[in-house]
Structures are given as C-alpha cells and as structure tokens.
Image: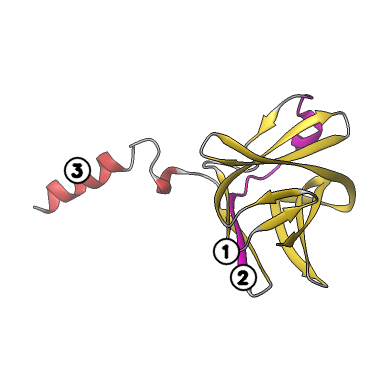
Amino acid sequence: MLKRLAVLAAAFSFVPGLALAQGNPRGEAKVALGGKSVTIDYGRPSLKGRDMIAQAPVGMTWRMGADAATTLKTEADLMFGDQKVAAGSYRLSAKRVAEDQWHLLVSADQDPVAEVPLTLATLDEPVEMLTIELTEKDGTGHFALMWGKSALKATFTTK
C-alpha cells in the first residue's frame, strides 16, 4: 500500500500545471474603499538581472505576473477616470502603447471592459520581485505596479 502511494505521489509531482509546480510566489494587494474590498491576486516573478519592463516592445500585451492570470475582484463599482468597472471579477493585463506609455487592460473573460492609461514613474530603488500595491488616500484608490526601476500607476474611485 505504501509503495502504491509513493508511486502516485511521484507521478503527480510531474503533472504540468499543478499549483505546486509553479515556481513563483503569489501576491495579493488589497484595499477597502467606501467599506468595500478591492483585491488583486498576481504572480511575483523576480528580475534576476533583467529589465523586463524596458524590454517589452510597443504593442505588446503583458499578463502582469507569472504562472497564472492576474485577477481583480471588487465589491464596489470602480471609476478609472471616466471608465467604469462594475463590481465583479476580472483579468488584468498591461499593454505598452508607446515608448513611455502603458495602459491597464481590464477584461471579463475575453471581453474588454476598460483600458486605463497608466502613469510611468522611475523608482529611486529597484524592486527585484514584481509588486502590486493598492492604497487609499482621501477616498481615492491608488494602483501601483513596481518592478525594476519602473512603476506604473493609476487612481480610481468608487461609484
């Protein structure tokens, strides 16, 4: 019996796509706005000496993380400028639209919901592992994706 369990355990350790086989840790960014939760779940790859944001070609859509999709779950309707993202669950990605311009893409399944311009900023200290932060100041939500010497930022409110 123990031999069979050992064989099964060994077999499953080589099955592609199992969560245990993924090499990067997961991260979670969370903020409360108007008493409602906004959460982003994402993979956290390391740079390992690379400058990945600078290497992305114009026109490229990036999954924003590693191993699995980056997801947004919001209990509140959000407004990014004049673009509404209704309460629910979404997939996030980013697109480099020009040399120094990025957009945050919010999708439900494969359907685009919002394309939000991001502000590109240079960080004083490099960030080795991809980091997404959600913060609140004076009722406004702040999104920041930081990696290497770059930060991509946007603000949002609840509707």
Looking at marks 2 and 3 on the same chain, the residue that comes earlier in the sequence is marked by 3
Task: Residue 41: say if magenta.
Answer: yes
Q: Nearer the viewer, mark 3 or mark 1?
A: 1
Residue at point 68% right, 73% down? 34
**Circle 3 residues within 10 Å: few <14, some 14–19, many ≥20:** few
Q: CA distance from mark 3 to mark 1?
A: 44 Å
Q: Which residue is mark 3?
A: 7
Q: Indicate the secondary structure of the residue bearing disc 2.
A: strand
Badge number at residue 105 = none
Magenta-drawn segment: 37-58
Q: Indicate the secondary structure of the residue bearing disc 3.
A: helix
Residue 6 pos. (x, y %): 20, 48
Residue kind at label 3, given as amino acid type: Val
Residue 130 pos. (x, y %): 69, 49
State the quadrant of the C terminus: bottom right
Q: CA distance from mark 1 to mark 2?
A: 6 Å
Task: Residue 98: say if magenta.
Answer: no
**What is the total number of numbered labels drawn onto the structure image?**
3
Q: Which residue is mark 1?
A: 75
**Circle 1 residues within 10 Å: few <14, some 14–19, many ≥20:** some
Residue 52 pos. (x, y %): 74, 35
Residue kind at label 2, given as amino acid type: Lys
Q: Is 41 situated left or right of 20 in this image? A: right
Q: Is residue 50 visible?
A: no
